[in-house]
Image (cartoon, rainbow, N blue to C red):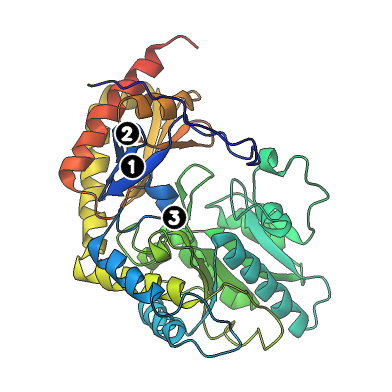
């Protein structure tokens, strides 16, 4: 295994210190590989945190974006934008839902979902609507989405939080029923189909079906945050589709534009007409450049059969990790390898944030979330050979870390 020693990248005194950055600066990429300003190469197993669906410098996407830049980048939602209609149609057809609102980020999409739920309640005469959310959830860092998030560490220092949330554990339908029994203010259940920042925790398929039935029985909105786990990452367009259910509201972002900022809220019949003119908006949402990125992303994903690739290469990667870490799994030092498709988490029995730098030193980009979970969300174009390379680099570093005394 070749080790590189990165040079600390220059930092600006004018940029707010909101990120704990690694000491490298990336300059360009090709496919699943990126290079830093010193010329060192890395295998990208993070994909911009599940954003770079098509990898880097995809020739068809680049050509489409270059073409669009020569036409229109931004106009305004005062006017019709044909590319919005085109992308909305593609999302509706693949989701089985009916209408789409476009914004620019996952945070905005989740904010819109929360507003939809509240207005849904007010339209029914509920003065103080309440929304069920989950332990370990992450929906964003605005005040409202932070309040819906289930991480006290990221909430610290930003109180008072927004009221109107009921928090429950994942995959426990009895707890959900107990927390909402007799409460006529409940209007929605809001959750990630696979929790991302919380540590790659999937909602069980039977649980998704039970939540759908409970929402139907109580006239609640089922709102599924697919910002990180959607857009083909698990091998279906949207992770909840493995359960055969349809949500009423589905926020999207990250991989939808393959790196160009695009957010969306897809709504089914129960929620599609809640917003009326003046109720919500976004200056940059649905701009022609972003819409072209979304349209081309879906077109290229289908042409290259990337959903099937996510399924097959994801299974290959998961199997490779399980074999390489078999002893650690047996001893409990590795608690679990979980997730689906190309959204995988490796939970260790001890904090492992040091692995992000160690992997950089060995030419691999990953992230660690929830302190003990290695997150792998590479571009959906990842090959089996590149999956093997991830295993070869990552697993010895995990083994060495676990052998160190606490």
Residue 74, image x and y in percent? 52, 76
Residue sitting nearer the eye, 33 or 102: 33
Residue sitting nearer the eye, 351 or 286: 286
Pointers 1 and 3 in contact (C-beta within 8 Å): no
Residue sitting nearer the eye, 224 or 180: 224
Q: Is residue 273 placed above or below 289 in the rendered structure? A: below
Which residue in the structure is indicated by mark 1?
A: 45
Which residue in the structure is indicated by mark 2?
A: 364
Residue 159, image x and y in percent? 81, 47
Which residue lies most toward the front here?
70
Q: CA distance from mark 1 to mark 3?
A: 25 Å
Identify which residue is drawn at 47% across, 31% down: 9
- Name the N-terminal-most of marks 1 and 2: 1
Pointers 1 and 2 in contact (C-beta within 8 Å): yes
- Name the N-terminal-most of marks 1 and 3: 1
- Name the N-terminal-most of marks 2 and 3: 3
Residue 377, image x and y in percent? 37, 47
Q: CA distance from mark 2 to mark 3?
A: 31 Å
């Amino acid at each position: 295994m070749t080790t590189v020693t990165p040079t600390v990248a220059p930092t600006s005194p004018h940029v707010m210190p909101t990120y704990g950055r690694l000491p490298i600066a990336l300059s360009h990429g090709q496919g699943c590989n990126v290079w830093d300003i010193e010329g060192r190469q890395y295998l990208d197993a993070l994909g911009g945190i599940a954003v770079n669906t098509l990898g880097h410098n995809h020739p068809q996407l680049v050509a489409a974006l270059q073409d669009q830049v020569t036409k229109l980048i931004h106009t305004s939602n005062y006017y019709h934008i044909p590319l919005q209609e085109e992308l909305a149609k593609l999302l509706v057809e693949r989701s089985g839902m009916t209408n789409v609102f476009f914004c620019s980020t996952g945070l905005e999409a989740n904010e819109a979902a929360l507003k939809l739920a509240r207005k849904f309640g007010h339209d029914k005469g509920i003065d103080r609507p309440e929304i069920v959310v989950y332990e370990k959830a992450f929906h964003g860092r605005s005040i409202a989405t932070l309040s819906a998030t289930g991480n006290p560490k990221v909430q610290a220092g930003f109180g008072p939080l927004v009221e109107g949330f009921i928090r429950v554990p994942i995959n426990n339908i009895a707890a959900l029923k107990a927390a909402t029994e007799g409460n006529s203010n409940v209007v929605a259940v809001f959750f990630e189909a696979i929790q991302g920042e919380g540590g790659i925790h999937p909602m069980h398929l039977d649980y998704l079906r039970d939540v759908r039935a409970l929402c139907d029985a109580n006239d609640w909105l089922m709102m599924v945050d697919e910002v990180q786990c959607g857009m083909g990452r698990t091998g279906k367009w949207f992770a909840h589709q493995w359960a055969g259910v349809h949500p009423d509201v589905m926020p999207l972002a990250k991989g939808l534009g393959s790196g160009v900022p695009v957010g969306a809220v897809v709504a089914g019949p129960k929620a599609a007409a809640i917003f009326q003119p003046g109720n919500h908006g976004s200056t940059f949402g649905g701009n022609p450049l972003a819409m072209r990125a979304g349209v081309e992303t879906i077109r290229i994903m289908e042409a290259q059969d990337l959903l099937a690739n996510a399924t097959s290469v994801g299974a290959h990667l998961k199997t490779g990790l399980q074999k390489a870490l078999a002893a650690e799994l047996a001893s409990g030092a590795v608690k679990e390898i979980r997730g689906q498709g190309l959204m995988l988490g490796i939970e260790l029995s001890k904090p492992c944030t040091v692995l992000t730098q160690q992997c950089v030193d060995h030419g691999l980009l990953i992230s660690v979330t929830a302190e003990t979970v290695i997150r792998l969300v590479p571009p959906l174009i990842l090959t089996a050979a590149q999956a093997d390379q991830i295993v070869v680099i990552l697993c010895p570093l995990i083994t060495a870390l676990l052998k160190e005394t606490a």
